[in-house]
Amino acid sequence: MFRRSFMLSSLAAAGAFSMPASAAGSGWSYESYLAAMKACDRPTSLTREQWNATQTRRKGALATIQSVLFHHFGAADPNVMRAFSEVPREFYHYDFASRAAFSQVAYEEVSKPWRIGFGSALSDYRGQAYMTQLCKPTPESVALEIGTGSGFQISVLSRIVKKAYSIEIVEPLGREVGRIFKPLGYDNVETRIGDGFFGWPEETGGFDLIMVTCAAQFVPPPLLQQLKPGGRMVIPMGQPFKREQFLYVFTKDEDGKIHSRKDVGVYFVPMTGRMLSGDKKPAAASGTTGQRL
């Protein structure tokens, strides 16, 4: 069972996507891919021919992302599109448990989650794009992610926000994924191993956005406390391993009052740690009925 996944319906393309000049000139190449993998002590057997094939598929994946965002939001946020064009997804196609890269299948036409070991997964890129835009990141934002996983989602956020934090509860995964950001030059990412239920209280200024990538039965109070006035949290909620889960969007107004609404139907595996072992509280969630993606 994947630790997290988010499946979206197929959508017709909303127009061809043109890769920004900044991505084209980023210097990412087959040689830099090999160097980054070596710096992380990750073995890879990806050939140059396979590399070229992934880069050919990449434009199609970006067009799909643009289509998804257009369908759900009316427009694709340029910052979100830029981030997805800059972060090399093939670098994150890696099984941490078996120490095996599977970069050759990156940017698959029909996006899906991929196992990365230790019960976790690299989520499908359409769902990640949707959740990213739903969080409304800006260059001034300080972001917190609960569930580092492959590191791809926090890498995308880091290309938009000022500072990005991420917490992983699975120790061997958290230890290994914490090494991948420096070789890519992502120096505004900070990760830790711990229970995301409690957030990151040391960041005393709080967070402009919080993204949770595992299903909670109720909203962890520390996360609401750490949300800044004007902040926004996106969290899947529902019973463990049940299909009746939904994303909820929580916002905090300038007076500190919490508002919520139900968004799209999703399926995630459960948040573990305190969420499953601590006292249960009812979910403080209400709003209109969400659609299912």
Image (cartoon, rainbow, N blue to C red):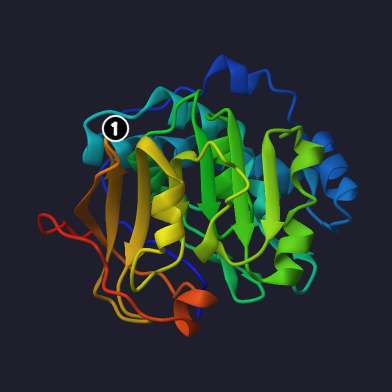
**Secondary structure state at the residue bearing disc 1:** loop
Q: Residue at x 78, y 43 (%)?
A: 48
How packed mark 1 is, by other alpha carbons closer than 10 Å (few <14, some 14-19, many 20 or more), is few
Nearest the camera: 76 or 67?
A: 76
Residue 239 sits in quarter: bottom left
Q: Residue at x 22, y 54 (%)?
A: 263
Is residue 40 among the parts visible in the rendering? yes
* Residue 73 x/y as whole percent: 24, 36
251 over 82 or under it: above or below: below
Residue tagged by mark 1? Answer: 254
* Residue 149 x/y as whole percent: 61, 60
Query: Is 90 left, or right, of 140 in this rendering?
Result: right
Residue 158 sits in quarter: top right
Query: Is 154 left, or right, of 50 in this rendering?
Result: left
Q: Residue at x 50, y 65 (%)?
A: 197
Outermost residue, front direction? 255
* Residue 120 x/y as whole percent: 59, 70
* Residue 40 x/y as whole percent: 85, 51
Query: Is 85 left, or right, of 7 in this rendering?
Result: right
Q: Residue at x 50, y 26 (%)?
A: 82
187 over 132 or under it: above or below: above
186 over 154 or under it: above or below: above
